[in-house]
Image (cartoon, grey):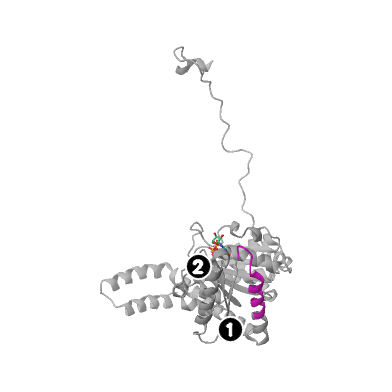
């Protein structure tokens, strides 16, 4: 037998014997057919599924919306166009706050609160900074444990990568699909840093700012622009020892809001305290939001704002596509490097360099 030839089976070694191995089966299963890529669904199939509220099909359509491939985009745009007549029937609510403010905890309880009365909720996000791994918002569904398993909730992480404008446009398009699928509540979450608030603000009806009480200098850290956009400011973690501080912060925010010019809607932003974790004051927050919707629907601002937003996104999309078309032209790319060098070494002025590149772009065949 083979094993007797192995040197460790020599008499001077005792104990274990080394057995000969068995022949390994081939590592590739010969019976396995190479996996075919699933054929792309047609826009008609997708629209039909979406209108039926089929979540798997909705997810697939959203994936196409987010895709960079031209083929996918072509289908996605058809789907969006066909869903448009069925969209619009929802309350679109933007939710922002710095990391740790309690956005996910709150969205979980807010979501359960509104779903008690029936209806459906889609939670989307805009987080252009994230490469998913870096603790991105909504990166993992476990952040909203109860909503994640709720049959009437659809949670979708932020489209990854790309410019803020691109990421935001995809989220806006996803809103259309979700509404066509019957989601009558849409949350758009964003992290309270950078420019993403402006993008979210331009696609929602109500903008909720989650704040924390704490160090006594709350107001300093807040970017004025964000506070000005808020229709409601809610101070989270008003529980335990923190209640007094939360109340103090509430008073500070209220007086700070007086310094701002009146809002376009005529609505006076409210400031409330609540605790997402302990489920305190949630109903009050939603009563405020209900009041807001009634107010802006009665005074016509709701419709006006949506129209304004539709126009805004038309121009945003044009701008973005023009930019992409320009910068993805290989000759433009080459020229830009050349011109940049000339500008940096003072051989050419910025203006004539820009003009040369644009001249090339506009006169190319
Ligand atoms: P996000 O980064 O804004 O999404 O914040 P999270 O929802 O992940 O919350 C950050 C931390 O704050 C977590 O440890 C939560 O458990 C905690 N937290 C959230 N809401 C509350 C609250 O109402 N009260 C207290 N005491 N802690 C909370």
x%, y% of residue 216?
46, 71
Front-lying residue, 316 or 226 = 226
Identify the residue at horizontal 61%, vertical 73% (top origin): 93
Would you name the residue on which mark 1 appears?
268
Q: Can the viewer see residue 66?
A: no
Ligand 1, seen in the image, is in the quarter at bottom right
Front-lying residue, 321 or 133 = 133
User: How far is disc 2 from disc 1 in space, using C-alphas?
Assistant: 23 Å
Q: Considering only vertical position in the picture, is 178 above or below 25?
A: below
Q: Considering only vertical position in the picture, is 219 above or below 53?
A: below
Front-lying residue, 22 or 141 = 141
Front-lying residue, 309 or 48 = 309
Disc 2 crowd, CA 10 A, few/some/many (<14, 14-19, 20+): some
Would you name the residue on which mark 2 appears?
98
Please tell me whether mark 1 sits on a helix, a strand or a loop: loop
Q: Main secondary structure of the magenta part?
A: helix
Left or right of residue 283, residue 132 in this image: left
x%, y% of residue 151?
71, 60
* Residue extending furthest toward the top: 11
Please tell me whether mark 2 sits on a helix, a strand or a loop: loop
Q: Which residues are magenta?
A: 276-291
* Residue extending furthest toward the left: 346
């Amino acid at each position: 037998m083979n094993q007797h030839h192995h040197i460790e089976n020599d008499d001077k070694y005792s104990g274990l014997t080394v057995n000969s191995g068995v022949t390994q089966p081939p590592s590739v299963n010969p019976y396995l057919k190479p996996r075919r890529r699933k054929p792309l669904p047609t826009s008609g199939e997708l629209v039909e599924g979406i209108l039926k509220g089929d979540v798997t099909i909705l997810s697939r359509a959203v994936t196409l919306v987010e895709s960079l491939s031209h083929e996918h985009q072509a289908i996605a745009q058809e789907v969006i166009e066909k869903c448009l007549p069925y969209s619009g029937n929802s309350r679109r609510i933007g939710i922002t706050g710095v990391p740790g403010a309690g956005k996910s905890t709150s969205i979980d309880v807010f979501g359960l609160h509104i779903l008690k009365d029936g209806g459906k909720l889609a939670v989307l996000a805009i987080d252009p900074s994230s490469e998913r791994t870096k603790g991105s918002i909504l990166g993992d569904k476990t952040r909203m444990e109860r909503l994640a398993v709720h049959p009437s909730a659809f949670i979708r992480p932020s489209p990854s990568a790309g410019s803020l404008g691109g990421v935001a446009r995809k989220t806006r398009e996803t809103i259309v699909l979700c509404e066509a699928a019957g989601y009558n509540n849409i949350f758009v979450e964003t992290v309270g840093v950078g420019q993403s608030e402006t993008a979210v603000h331009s696609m929602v009806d109500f903008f909720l700012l989650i704040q924390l009480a704490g160090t006594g200098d709350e107001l300093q850290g807040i970017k004025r622009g964000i506070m000005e956009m808020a229709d409601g400011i809610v101070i989270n973690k008003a529980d335990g020892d923190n209640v007094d501080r939360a109340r103090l912060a509430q008073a500070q925010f209220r007086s700070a809001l007086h310094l701002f010019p009146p809002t376009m809607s005529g609505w006076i932003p409210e400031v409330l305290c609540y605790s997402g974790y302990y489920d305190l004051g949630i109903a009050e927050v939603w009563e405020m939001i209900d009041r807001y919707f009634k107010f802006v629907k009665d005074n016509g601002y709701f419709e006006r704002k949506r129209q304004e937003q539709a126009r805004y996104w038309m121009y945003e999309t044009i701008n973005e596509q023009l930019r992409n078309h320009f910068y993805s032209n290989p000759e433009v790319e080459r020229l830009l490097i050349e011109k940049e060098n000339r500008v940096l070494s003072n051989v050419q002025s910025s203006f004539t360099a820009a003009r040369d590149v644009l001249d090339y772009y506009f006169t190319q065949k």
